[in-house]
Image (tube, helix red, strand yellow):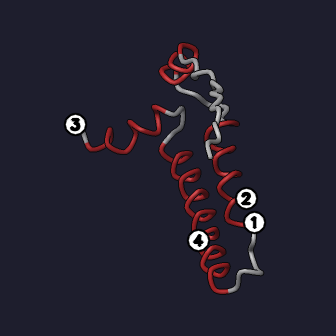
Amino acid sequence: MPVKRLFTSHPASVGETYSQHFGQAMSFSAAMLGGAICCAVHAFLPFLCEKTGSKIITNLHDRMVLNRSRLSPQTESSQAQFSPPQPTTTTVEASATE
């Protein structure tokens, strides 16, 4: 595999150039680092940063998965064919015996 392809293959698979992917990955890295620091602060001082870590995770998930505007053709076709399993409910009856 040519060296250039090592740097461009994955970014191209998500519809980005190397520079765009670098910027996105670094912004995720900064957010994760901030979240890690907040979680560490929360571990020592539980009254601080009570929801900061979970908010950061939710925001990153939304940015990466829910609001991705640039999808590769492979991702678009696999999403069109994917149908998530439907939730099922199971009722368990408890019998009381004395």
| Up/down of 83 relative to 98, above or below | above
In which quarter of the view is residue 7 placed?
Answer: top left
Q: State the residue position of label 1.
A: 51
Q: Tag on residue 36?
A: 4
Mark 2 or mark 3: name the one nearer the start of the chain: 3
Tell me the mark number nearer the camera, choosing from 4 and 3.
Answer: 4
Distance, label 1 to label 3, CA atoms, is: 44 Å
| Up/down of 30 relative to 91, above or below | below
Distance, label 4 to label 2, CA atoms, is: 12 Å
* Label 2: which secondary element: helix
Mark 1 or mark 3: name the one nearer the start of the chain: 3
| Up/down of 2 relative to 56, above or below | above
Q: Are marks 1 and 3 in contact (CB under 8 Å)?
A: no
Query: Amino acid under label 1?
Result: Lys
Distance, label 1 to label 2, CA atoms, is: 6 Å
Q: State the residue position of label 3.
A: 1
Tell me the mark number nearer the camera, choosing from 2 and 3.
Answer: 2
In which quarter of the view is residue 87 placed?
Answer: top right
The residue closer to the viewer here, 91 or 70, is 91
Q: Are marks 4 and 3 in contact (CB under 8 Å)?
A: no
Q: Position of residue 4 (x, y in %)?
A: 32, 42
Q: Position of residue 42 (x, y in %)?
A: 67, 78
* Label 4: which secondary element: helix
Query: Amino acid under label 4?
Result: Ala
Query: Amino acid under label 3?
Result: Met
- The residue sitting at 69% across, 60% down in the picture is 54
Instruction: Say few, some or many: other residues with alpha carbon within 10 Å of mark 2 (under 14 / 14 to 19 / 20 or more).
Output: few
